[in-house]
Image (spheres, rainbow, N blue to C red):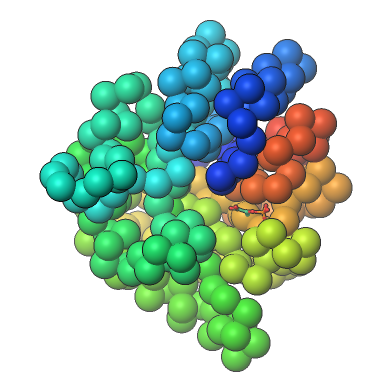
């Protein structure tokens, strides 16, 4: 089922105690989610078990890892595998965040391997794509994200692709305070959905949640989420404030 999603990406922020407090403040606000809504917290690895236990009784609240390795196991000191994430009961993992692509040189090919490992381990990948400013300035964003999709995703079959989520995150809007306009977001989301429809059929494309990420905040979330192909958001900075993120959850499409 295509879901409306508010996903928090804490990145490398908050102490354990601050993270626990933030989660509790959000959960205590008592927002009840409909069956077609999810709130997902992508927390640092050492907080996954604490966070999973905090949301265990809460309908629709889920926990995600922020990354996994592209190998299944082995001599990769400091790395965390999809299987490890699965075996502690986590069902989501961000794959291909632009910060991973930029600082850890993750290529589309590596991300294809990560997607495979997530799916093999019953983890829903939240696959991030999006163009840098230089690409947008040349108006080549559609071809650019198409290549990201083709090289990382399009080897999946219909049943596999139905299990993923996509986050369109224009790099120029991440952590910059600049947000894509509602029209820019809708245009790209509709492009992504049409690429999925061409490859897998309209019925499959209609089932996949496509989130927008890039300086989403309480003040712009409702407008962004109102677009027909925007199924919620992946939120960095604003997810570190309980009050901001609560408003973002409330802005999900009704
Ligand atoms: C992100 O980290 O995925 C993100 C979109 O960050 P921000 O909301 O801070 O732009």
Q: Is residue 28 visible?
A: yes
Residue lying at the far top of the rendered structure? 57
Residue lying at the far front of the rendered structure? 77
Q: Residue 53, relative to residue 65: is it above or below? A: above
Residue nearest the observer in this picture, 139 or 195: 139
Residue nearest the observer in this picture, 215 or 147: 215
Q: Residue at x 60, y 47 (%)?
A: 234
Quadrant housing residue 183: bottom right
Q: Residue 141, relative to residue 11: is it above or below? A: below
**Image check: 173 left or right of 165?**
right
Q: How many marks?
A: 0
Q: Residue 71, relative to residue 197: is it above or below? A: above
Q: Residue at x 21, y 49 (%)?
A: 76
Residue 106 spot, x, y in % from top left: 36, 65
Residue nearest the observer in this picture, 245 or 79: 79
Quadrant the N terminus occupies: top left
Residue 113 spot, x, y in % from top left: 23, 56
Q: Is residue 39 visible?
A: no
Residue 28 spot, x, y in % from top left: 73, 13
Quadrant housing residue 149: bottom left
Quadrant the C terminus occupies: top right
Residue nearest the observer in this picture, 112 or 154: 112
Q: Residue 184, relative to residue 33: is it above or below? A: below
């Amino acid at each position: 089922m295509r879901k409306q999603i508010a996903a928090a990406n804490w990145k490398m922020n908050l102490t354990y105690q601050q993270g626990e407090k933030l989660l509790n403040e959000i959960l205590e606000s008592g927002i009840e989610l409909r069956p077609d809504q999810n709130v997902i917290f992508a927390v640092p690895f050492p907080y996954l078990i604490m966070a999973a236990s905090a949301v265990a009784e809460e309908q629709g609240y889920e926990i995600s890892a922020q990354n996994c390795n592209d190998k299944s196991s082995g001599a990769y000191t400091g790395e965390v595998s999809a299987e490890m994430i699965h075996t502690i009961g986590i069902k989501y993992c961000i794959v291909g965040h632009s910060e991973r692509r930029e600082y850890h040189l993750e290529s589309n090919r590596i991300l294809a391997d990560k997607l495979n490992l997530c799916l093999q381990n019953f983890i829903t990948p939240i696959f991030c794509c999006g163009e840098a400013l230089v690409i947008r300035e040349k108006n080549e964003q559609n071809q650019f994200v198409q290549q990201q999709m083709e090289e990382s995703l399009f080897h999946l079959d219909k049943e596999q692709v139905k299990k993923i989520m996509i986050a369109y995150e224009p790099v120029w809007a991440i952590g910059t305070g600049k947000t894509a306009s509602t029209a820019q977001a809708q245009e790209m989301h509709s492009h992504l959905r049409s690429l999925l429809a061409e490859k897998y059929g309209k019925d499959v494309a209609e089932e996949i949640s496509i989130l927008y990420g890039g300086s989403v905040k309480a003040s712009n979330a409702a407008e962004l989420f109102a677009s027909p192909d925007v199924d919620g958001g992946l939120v960095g900075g604003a997810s570190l404030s309980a009050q901001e993120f609560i408003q973002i959850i409330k802005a999900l499409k009704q």
